[in-house]
Structure formats: structure tokens, C-alpha cells
Image (cartoon, coloured by chain):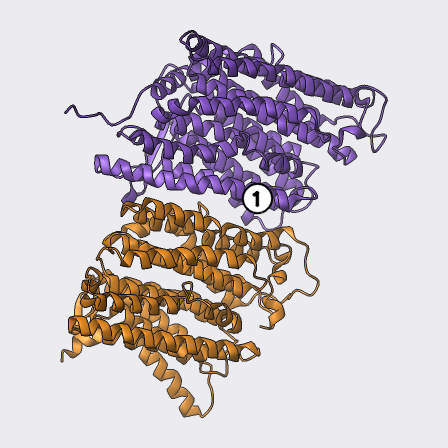
Amino acid sequence: MNWSLILTSMLPEHLLLVGMLAILGLEIKSGRSRDGFGFAVTFVAAAAVAALWLYATGFHGAPFLHHFSVDPASTLPKAVLLALAVPVLLISRDDFAETPYYTLVLASLYGACLVISSDSFLTLFLGIEIMSLPVYALVLLGLLREQSTEAALKYLVMGGVATATLLMGIAFIYGWSGSLGLASFAGALGSTDPLALAGVALITAALFLKAAVVPFHAWAPDAYEGASAPVTAYMATIIKAGVLLAALRLYGTVPVVAPVVGLIVVLPLVSMAWGNLAALRQVSFRRMIAYSSIAHAGYLFYALLGDGRGRWEAIVFYLVVYGLANVLAFAALPRGADDERHDRLDALKGLYHRRPFAAIMIAFAMLSLAGLPPLPGFAAKFLVFKNVLAAGYTWYAVAGLVASYLGLYFYLRVIQYMFMAEQQPEAARGAPRRMAVLASVLCLVPSVLIMLFPGWLIDRL
Amino acid sequence: MAESTVLNLVLWLPVLGMLALALAPRITDRAVRGFTFGVMLLQLVLTAWLYARFDGAVPGLQFESKVSWIGDWGVNYHIGLDGLNVLLVALTAFLGPLVVAGAFSAITQGVKLFHSMVFFIQFAMLGTFLAQDLFLFYVFWEAMLIPMFLIIGIWGGERRIYATVKFVLYTAFGSILMLAAVIYLVWSQQQATGALSFAFADLGGHPLSLEAQSWLLGAFALSFAIKVPMVPLHTWLPDAHVEAPTAGSVILAGVLLKMGTYGFMKLGFPLFPDATRAFTPALLVLSVVSIVYGACLALVQSDIKKVIAYSSISHLGYVMLGLLSLDLIGIQGAIVQMVSHGLVAGGLFTMVGMIYERCHSRAIADYGGLAKLLPVYSVFFAILTLASIGLPTTSGFTGEFMALLGAFNAFWPQHVAGNSLPLAMAILAVSGVVLGALYMLWLAERLLFGPVKAPHQPFQDLVARERAILVAFVVAIFALGLFPREPLAKTELAARDYQQRVMSTRLPVEVAP
């Protein structure tokens, strides 16, 4: 065993683990629940810096050969994901003081890091499970609401189905190729063997389920609504990103050919259209974001149609922009008691008159999610559809763009409520929390920079 | 100071203004108005200086700046003045201070946000005209939606939400298909030349089959035709105009509608010349239907704003007619008509706003005999009415006459050669002039003459600020009507270039067997 290689190449993971143990250790020592906020933020930020450092030095290494490897293509997404987790943690301040929240988030992030670096189905599966399991508990930590239990249970059952499907798919691929390496999935993509194709379909379906792509999306609105705001933000950004990065890991740079193309086109396309249409009817902010995230999962999987390099660029760029916009929206969202009443979209009415900066930031996030230029979401969407078209799928790109158009109105409606409606008398009027303000600034500044200089980020992908 | 720096300053001044407004936390409404007006005035002065220095005898771009923006995609921040956009940039800068001054007393709620949005839209409009890179153009083009959405939605009338959502959804639908066409065009360019570029100059070169050209023109044309708007895609316009605050209507009629015709002139027609010629008959018919149908609809409206809104549809039909004639006089007439309509409709909407502020009604039936009640107002209204009709010595005459003359010039030989449809369309278009006289004179008659009638009497005639605004409009209208030589000289080379490009072909050369 090359201990120094394991130490350096897995530095982000180690930092997460140490953070987790430190919080647990403190709790055991003092014999009661402790607020792990400080530790969690410090260690996640440190892990993000470590991943960035590995990326900047162009680190290559495989501490566990054929199972786990580290290269710039994995350290950059890792850094992005961990960096996005920092504002999510900042929003959680005060909500989870007496709960194991921070330990669970750190564990889930650890799983996401495993996914990003995985080279075999074994690590991939472990990573996905470590990433998802804590989230079932996180949804329950909303606690204040009756729906939380139902939401967590639904999420757990659907997650279990996804796990079973994933395992079945892995078994098929293993049976076909005799190897647990992720490369065998790429090989199966081009094969005509029904066994291999069934494996591809099952694994892809499992990812669709985890990322909430229609028709495997039904759990998402309930889970998003049932969970508390920070957990919703976590699910909508980090978990979604983790699943997409898993898909990227699996599909690699191999172009998709028929019949797999059908799978990658139809369901994501339906997902965009349905997510965008269903979002129109929502009266709850979190349910709306859930449907929005269903549509965005569609765009992200659509990007797999592109060629190898462009695919990677498009998905990572999209995840950065989408994650920032989503977390920004939740960070700027005024929070009262986290009950049903304040989750109504109506609660946003007249927000501009009460809290102009919060309203402007939410508007920024919504327009970015809608993909309206000049906001960064436009460049992200442009990159996805440019790659789809460049791969020769002209009409699929047109269909995708039209499906994305359907989503414009419900994002605008949020702005309409905030700027053009009268205030609701019973709306929450608490002062903005310091940590949430910090989180929104942490999301807004990079978003604005990406808006002004998208080339800077794209050149680095 | 180099001219290109000044041009950049003209473009970015509104952004600086917006930032200044955002960073000044406690500032009185009065100060916000004064500051915005000052910045707009400075922008106008700088633009006037550039306009004076713009040399019509030099082909291509002037005061150009080009910086790599998204290196990987070959996207540049590339702006410059040419004969096609110089007048429109001048028009936009000219309307800026007038819009702000016109809103001095009308906007009392959310003053800071309003002026930020006026800055924002000014920036986006100038950017759209100045952009010489398709990606940049598209970003500015779409960015116009955001401030307009808020301007109509926050400070509009009763049904403002409906109107603004309709406006955005209509325009965005056109844009999304245009985006697909943009990506396809750039991609096919990359296939042909190997290099990724969004520069306008690079996109006209590679061969495209007639089928591809037709699809692409269709996508671009849909987006542009919605903005113009051409019948049958015009239904958003009356709602948007009626519900918008005065400033919004002036911006919309003055500049935003020209985006559509400018798009056709700069991109749609020259980029896809073969498809343009193939579809000229259909486009001609739509233009003339817009002229006549718009005029007929204007005739039967009971709301002053709606009359002017529908008249816009009619007047912009002449622009399309001139552009499609491919005759030099017609093309130049189209450009003059764009500016003229911006001034005339802008002025008329400002005047409707002034009377609305006093009486809170836009119904024609509520008014009568204003000539006795508000003599100064009535004089200005009469002048603008005549300019809208296209009386000689006003800018409206120059534009419409040249567009029609160009159309007859071009279509008579075609008629002799056996193709009579274009000529028939040109003849029908003339009827629009008559209808235009009818609805405008009738409107003026009902408002200004007859028994004195108004919802709130007595009220004050125009104050000095309002007179100054209207004097500016009237002077500009007569200047363009009486001395069109200078602006025409500045646009001539660009118009010739447009003519040549639409008459050329970019079909793939067939290899001889």
C-alpha cells in the first residue's frame, strides 16, 4: 500500500471524514448533541480547497487501482460540489442545532466524492449509496411538519427501488463483460447484445430515478416539499450533481448510438416538458423548485447526446451555474417558521417592497434557471444544446429548446409575485439572517462573474 | 480620446448609471430622476459627437472595438457603427433623455427601480444595434425582455400582468427558435471552414442549401416578425402598448419595434439571400397586409393609445416594403422610415401620456374641443398628427415616399417582365397612406375640435418641461424631413452593401459531372 498516495490523493475525502469524526467525538465527549456548524463549514471548505489544490497541481493518481482514481477531470467537479455545499451549510445555521444534521451532510458529501472518482461499479455503487442514505434521514429532520415522515418514506422506498435497479443493471453488465470496471459500461453502450443493453437501460433508469427524470420523478415534489429548505437545496443541487457526475463517469466520452440514443432523448425530453408544465400549477415554492429540478435533470441528461469532450464541459458548466442559482434562491428566500404557510408562493408577494435585495437575488436566480440571457443559465443551456446539435441531432436540439421555452413563465411568475403584487398581510417579516446573507453573496458573486466572463470558466473545463 | 472608447462609453454609460443607483442607498426620487436624465443627456451628447464624426464615405465598421469574450467558442465582444445602425443608435440615444423627462411626474412609485430598468433597457437596445457578433447580438436581444417585463408589469395599467406576460411569451417564443437557428448557422459555418466564429462577417460566407436557408430564415424571420410586428403575429402589441406606462410605450414604439426590421436588414435577409428572394412574394403580401390591416384596425379603435399602436403596425409595413424592394431608394427609405416612426410614434405616445396624467382616461369619446382647452397641447398634437400622416417637410414623408418610390422602381420592371404581384402589392400599399390620413385626422378632429369635453376640468396646459420635450420631438421630425441628405449620405454605402448581399447567392456550387 502506498500510504502517502492514499493520503494526498484522497485529501478532500479525508478532511470530510475527520470533520465527521470530530463532530461525533465532541458529542460523545460532552454526552449531548452539539452544534457542529463551525466544524462542518470549516472541514467542507477545507476539503473544497484541497480538491481545488489537487486540480490546480494537475494531480494524477490511483490509490486503489481500478477502483478509485484521481485526475483533474474528477478533482474539478469535486471542488465544485464541495464549494457548493458551503453555502448550503451556511443556510442551515440555527435550523438543526440539536440534530445529527452536519454529520449526515458530511457523510453524504463523502459518498459524492467517491462517486466522482470511482473506476469500478463497486466504488460507484458504494458512493451512490453513501451519498443517498443520509439524505433519507435529512428529509426527516424537517421534523416540524407532518409531511416530512411521508416524504422521507417515499424517498426511501423509491431510493431502494433505484438501488435494486442499479444492482440488477450492474449484474447484467458484469455477466456480459465479466468485469466490474466502469469501462465495461462504455463497451456495452456500443454493443448489440440484449444483455449488455438491458444492463445499460437498467443502470440509466436507476440514475434517472435518483435524479428525478420523468417517469421516475414522482418522489421529488413530495420529498422537496416535506424537507426543510436547506435540505431541499442540498437535494436539488448536490445530490442531483452527484448523480449526473456518476452518469458522466459511466458514459465517459463514448458517443451514444442507437438504441441507447432513444433512451437519452425521449425521457429527458419528456422530463423537460413535463417538469416545466407541471411547475406552472404549483402553489408551493419548494414543489415548484422540485418540478424545475425535474426539467433541469432533463437538460443535463440531454447533454449526454453530445460528443465526449463537449459533454463533460456542458454538464460540469451546467452543474456549476444551476447549483449556484438554486442555492442562491434558497439562501435569499425569507424564512419564517418553516411551516406550510411560508412555503406558499403567495408568501413571496410584494417581497420587493419588504426586502428589495432578497427579491432581486431571487429574481436573478429565477432568470438564470430560466436560461434567459444575459444570465449565466443561458450560457449553460446554450452549451448543452450546441453540443446536441453539433453531434448531428438538429431536431432534438430544437425540440429541447422548445421544451425549455415552456418553463419561462413559471420562473417569471415568481418575479411577478415579488415585484408586481400587493404584500400579503400575514407574510413573514423576520430580519434576514447573517449566515443566509453570506451564503447568498457567496452564490451571487461567482454567478455574476460567470455571467460577465463565461469564457474564463469554459476555458478551464 | 479615441472614438471607439467613446462608443464603448455610450454603450456602458447606462450600466454605470444603474450601478450608481444601486449603490446609493438613500437618495430622493428627485435626485434619481435628475441623475438619470443627466446620464442620458451625456450619452446623447457623446452619441451626437460620434454621429458627426461618422463618415458615410467609408465602407464597413467605424469606431470598432473587438475583444475576445468566450475564447473557446470564438465569441467576441465586437461592437461598431456602420451605415445600418448609425441612425438607429442616434435615435435610441435621442429618445433616452426624452423618456426620462417624460416620466418625471408620471412615475411616483419605485422610482429607483424604474430608472434602473430604463438604464437597463437602454443598454440592451444599444447593444443589440451595435453588436457585430451573433452571440453578443442574441444576448442583448433577449436581455431587452427583462426590463420591459418589469416596466410594463410594475408601472402599467389595469391589465398589466396579462399584457406583460403576453409580450414576453410571444417574443421569447420567436427567440428560442432563433437560438436554434443561430446554433445551426454557426455549427454549419464551423463544418465548412473548420473555425468556430460568431462574427457577422464570417457567417455570410459558407454555402448553404436552399432548404437550410429557408429553415434558418424561417426561424430568424419568426423572431423578427414578432418584434416588428407583422400581421398575424401582432396581437401582443396593442395589449403591451395600452397597458405600458408612457415611458414603456415610447421605448416600445420608438426603438423596440425597430429591432425587428433592423434584424431583417442586418441578419435575416443578407444571411439567407436565396431564401429571401424565394420568399419575397409571401413576405411582401404580409407586409402589405400589415400596412392595410393595421390601418383599418387603427380606424375603428376607441382608445387613443390603440390607434397609435395599430398605426405602428401599418407604418412598419413600409419599412418591410422598402427592404424587400431591393432598390437603393427603397432601402434608404426604409431606414429613414424606421427613425421617423420612432420619432413620430414616440412623440405621439408621449402626448397621450401627458393627457392621461391630467384626465386619467384614454378613451377618445371622453374628449373634445381640446383646441380651446389646451391650445399649446393641441398645436403639438396637430403637428405630430401631420407627421404621422406623412405630410411633406416632415420625416414621415421622406420615409414613406422613398420606400414606395423604391418599391415602384423595382416592381415596374418585374410587372413588364410578367410578374405583376409585387406591383399590385405596391399599389395596395399606397392605400395605406390614404387610410393613415383618415384615421389620424379623424382622431385629431375628435380630440381637438367639436364641443369642449374632458373628464376632469379645468386643467393646466403643458408646463415648460413638457413643451421642451415636444419641441425636441418636433425639431427632430422637421430636421429629418427637411434635410434628409446628411443621414442618407451616411447610410448609402451600407444600403448598397445590403442590396448587393441580398441579390447575391450562397447556394452550394454544383460540381459538374
What is chain A's hue in the picture?
orange
Question: Could you tell whether B246 is left or right of B366 in the image?
Answer: left
Q: Which residue is mark 1?
A: B149
Residue at the spot x=49%, y=25% of the render?
A: B88
The answer to whether residue A125 is above or below residue A183 is below
**Which chain is depicted purple?**
B
Q: Position of residue A198 (x, y in %)?
A: 26, 68
Q: On the image, which quarter does residue B119 sit in?
A: top right
Indicate the position of residue A274 as horizontal and vertical percent values: 47, 58
Quadrant of image for the C terminus of chain B = top left
Residue sitting at 65 percent across and 44 percent down?
A: B160
Relative depth, front residue between A358 and B349:
B349
Question: Seen in the image, is A211 located left or right of residue A54?
Answer: right
Picture layout, residue A271 above or below residue B136: below
Could you say which quadrant of the image residue B410 lies in? Answer: top left
Res. A145 visible in picture: yes
Q: List x then y, in percent, for residue A384.
A: 34, 51
Which quadrant of the rendered structure holds the N terminus of chain B? top left
